[in-house]
Image: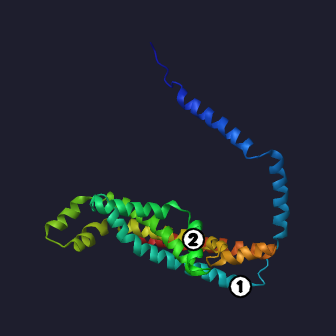
Amino acid sequence: MRRAAFAPNWPLRLALLALGLYAIWATAQLGITGERLWTGFGEAGRFLARMWPPNFARWELLLEGMLESIQIALLSTALGIVLSLPLGLMAARNLSPWWLRGPVRGFIAVCRSLHYVIVAIIFVKALGFGALAGVAALTVASMGFVAKLFAEAIEEISMKQVEAVRATGAAPAAVLLYGVLPQVASRFVGFCIYQLDSNLRNSTLVGIVGAGGIGGTLFAAFKRFDYDFVAAILLSIIALIFAAEVISGRIRQALR
């Protein structure tokens, strides 16, 4: 009996059909209709019209918020990287015993499980309003991201180089310095640059919940219906992210 060259995958087709039916049902349950979308597009057009032209008259307030966001991003990234290095080493399956690796990987999972805005709200309640809460929240987020990727990079290294350094009678610190870190240094630098990029974006958002930065200025402008100043803030944030992207790209090229 001849078999078709491309036999139909009925389980996959049924799964896709079920997914499509569920999407239709969920759309109805959430009240998403064409009328609401059409009305929303009209309101969005009127809202954008009120944002033009952008008003940069209060550039000192804008600059102050942007500088605070940059400082939050730099401090949280630096602290997150410093703390992620030992966490990544202790979480690697090929370097750490299970009794150490398990709790550390659990701690990293906890750091990654909550969105940074939720963490920022918690720190605002604990530490009060201001940049300190933003730095703490983004440090936790950086630890969760960088430590996980760093641990995975260490698990992919060649153990031959590690064993060769151990065979010389080197101390554990020397094994890490000469056998492990040289194999993952370039990837670790890439993780750090990406996290700095991410924290620059995130630092503009944590201010909305009171954790410092330009986000607080943006939220206040929204509450005052000061939409032309909102446009100026948004354009400044976009310019900052574009500048960070260009700089990080140049750094990556220099490290290759």
For mark 2, what is the residue?
A: 122
Residue at image position (37%, 68%) is: 87
Looking at the image, residue 87 sits to the left or right of residue 112; the answer is left
Image height check: is 20 above or below 97? Answer: above
Looking at the image, residue 238 sits to the left or right of residue 185; the answer is right
Across and down, in percent, residue 47 comes to 83, 65
Label 2: few (<14), some or many (≥20) within 10 Å?
some
In-front residue for pair 161/24: 24
**Which circle's residue, 1 or 2, is located before the other in the chain?**
1
Across and down, in percent, residue 111 comes to 47, 65
Label 1: few (<14), some or many (≥20) within 10 Å?
few
Label 1 and label 2: CA atoms lie apart by 27 Å
Q: Which mark is residue 61?
A: 1
Across and down, in percent, residue 39 comes to 85, 53
Element assignment for label 2: helix
Image height check: is 87 above or below 1? Answer: below
What residue type is disc 2 on? Ile
Residue at image position (57%, 33%) is: 15
Q: How many marks?
A: 2
In-front residue for pair 63/202: 202
Contact flag, marks 1 and 2 (Cβ < 8 Å):
no
Looking at the image, residue 116 sits to the left or right of residue 152; the answer is right
Element assignment for label 1: helix
